[in-house]
Amino acid sequence: MTPVQKFRTHEDARQALWLAPGDPRIPRRLRRVLSMAMWLYPLDRSHGVFKFRSIEEANTSRRQWRRRGASD
């Protein structure tokens, strides 16, 4: 749990968000931010190289991929 902090100004609150370079808490905060980002917007894409028998099959696969919400 995060302790409750009180601030007199918005500037004091903004300054409290920053960590000094090299602070050991930086990796943990970064992991939390990235995990929340992946939870909010998961990337649904297949890995690897795909081979298609025809250009029509490749175009169909691309259209289905875009329909699922992926972008270029």
Image: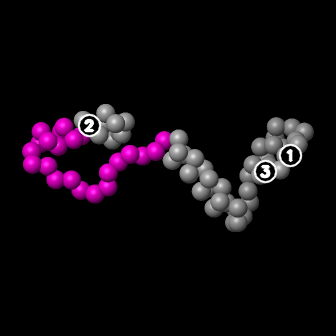
Give the numbered dot on residue 2.
3
Query: What sort of colour scheme is used for the picture?
Result: one colour
Instruction: Identify the residue at horizontal 70%, vertical 66% (top origin).
Output: 24
Instruction: Identify the residue at horizontal 51%, vertical 47% (top origin).
Output: 38
Select label 1 or label 3 by which is in front.
3
Q: Crowdedness of circle 2 by 10 Å Cα count: few (<14), some, many (20+)?
A: few
CB under 8 Å between discs 2 and 1: no
Q: Main secondary structure of the magenta part?
A: loop
- The relative height of residue 21 versus residue 17 in the rendered view (above or below) is below
In terms of image quadrants, where is residue 10? top right
What span is in magenta? 41-62
Residue marked by disc 1: 5
Q: Crowdedness of circle 3 by 10 Å Cα count: few (<14), some, many (20+)?
A: few
Question: Extreme front residue here?
Answer: 1
Instruction: Identify the residue at horizontal 77%, vertical 43% (top origin).
Output: 14
Q: Position of residue 58 (x, y in %)?
A: 17, 43
Instruction: Identify the residue at horizontal 86%, vertical 38% (top origin).
Output: 9
Residue marked by disc 2: 64
Q: Amino acid at mark 3?
A: Thr
Q: Amino acid at mark 1?
A: Gln
Q: Amino acid at mark 2?
A: Gln
Give the numbered dot on residue 26.
none
Select label 2 or label 1 by which is in front.
2
Question: Extreme top residue here?
Answer: 67
Asked whether residue 42 is drawn in magenta, I would say: yes
For the C terminus, the image quarter is top left
Tell which circle, 3 or 2, labels the residue nearer the N-terminal end. Answer: 3
